[in-house]
Amino acid sequence: MELLYTILKFAVLTVLVASAAEAAVLSLRAAGPRYDWRASGVSLIDFLVREYPLRWLLPLAFWSQAMDWLYQHRLWTLPMDHWTGWAACFIAQEFCYYWYHRAAHRVRWFWCTHAIHHSPNDLNLSAAYRFGWTGKLTGTLLFFMAAPLLGMPPKVILVMLSLNLLYQFWIHATWIPRLGPLEWILNTPSAHRVHHASNLEYLDGNYGGVLIVFDRLFGTYIAERPDLPCRYGLVRPVTGYNLLKIEFDQWRSLWRDLRGARSVPEALGYLFQPPGWRPCGAGETTEDLRRAALNAPAGPAAGSPGKSRSSPGSTAPPR
């Protein structure tokens, strides 16, 4: 356990140095798009604010105490002095993470925070640590509460979750090719490119953390296609670098919809239905957009953004 804490202690510096090194190399390349230093700066400030002032202003105290209480009332105890206990914790954490991540895309309340991670229009290592500032408030750790009840120590689960996120740092690199048989088991750069893509064909898939097996098991795995390059960012790209707008535009749009709700069920729909949901049924969820693309007359190629689910000023719930 001490070794894991040591790894996490030096992880922040390693992540920032690796991101800066990638930025330097990509900015010097002759071919390809120019490296977006301003977007990387937005990601860095997002990270620094979250990791330092917000870490103290919004501690994990409530969620960690809830996990401790559940562990004290656990149904059984795992043998953490044996490798099987650690393996069970790893699989359980992966399972919980899959469902959290899936909800972060399919439930608007959670998407309002997670959309910040998907807002960069270029996928690179700096995008890996743009997570937004409201995750502790929205209840991310609710998805991990079953683990301590089943006998998994909360500290072990939280450390494994941190290592899970640390693993995902490198898969934000777009210059790493497909990795052969590993694509069947691990969440790879190829799988994560698809996850970050805003093409209609790629939306809402590949939710795994370290493993991709739960995506394959639950039907959410989408393979990267050589004939369909990934277009990154939100369905309608963020066009500016105003950090406060990026952080809070999703919440502002949600508040606007809640104020206009005509009933409690409608308000609950805005909160917990997928991003883009409308009570009239003519919304801009992933399913709505795909249906519209299938029924549209010949025109723009499949996978074009269509109507906005993300741009400031849009009247539709953002995506």
Image (cartoon, rainbow, N blue to C red):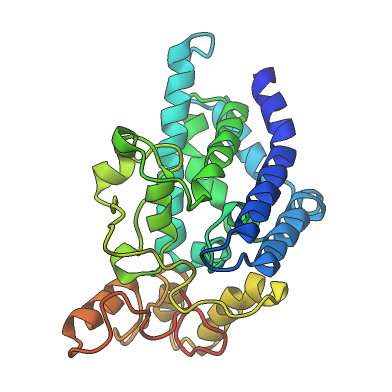
Camera sees residue 75 = no
Residue located 46% across and 66% down the image:
232
Placement of 22 over or under 33, stated as above or below: above
Which sits in the foreground, 254 or 43?
A: 43
Placement of 190 over or under 81, stated as above or below: below
Q: How many marks?
A: 0
Which sits in the foreground, 290 or 78?
A: 290
**Image position, residue 75 (x, y; %):** 45, 24
**239 on left or right of 244:** left
Camera sees residue 82 = yes
Q: Quarter-wise, where is residue 68 in the image?
A: top right
Residue located 50% across and 40% down the image:
144
Farthest top residue in view: 81
Which sits in the foreground, 218 or 65?
A: 218
Residue located 41% across and 42% down the image:
188
**73 on left or right of 64:** left
**Image position, residue 118 (x, y; %):** 52, 63
Residue located 36% across and 44% down the image:
178
**Image position, residue 298 (x, y; %):** 18, 89
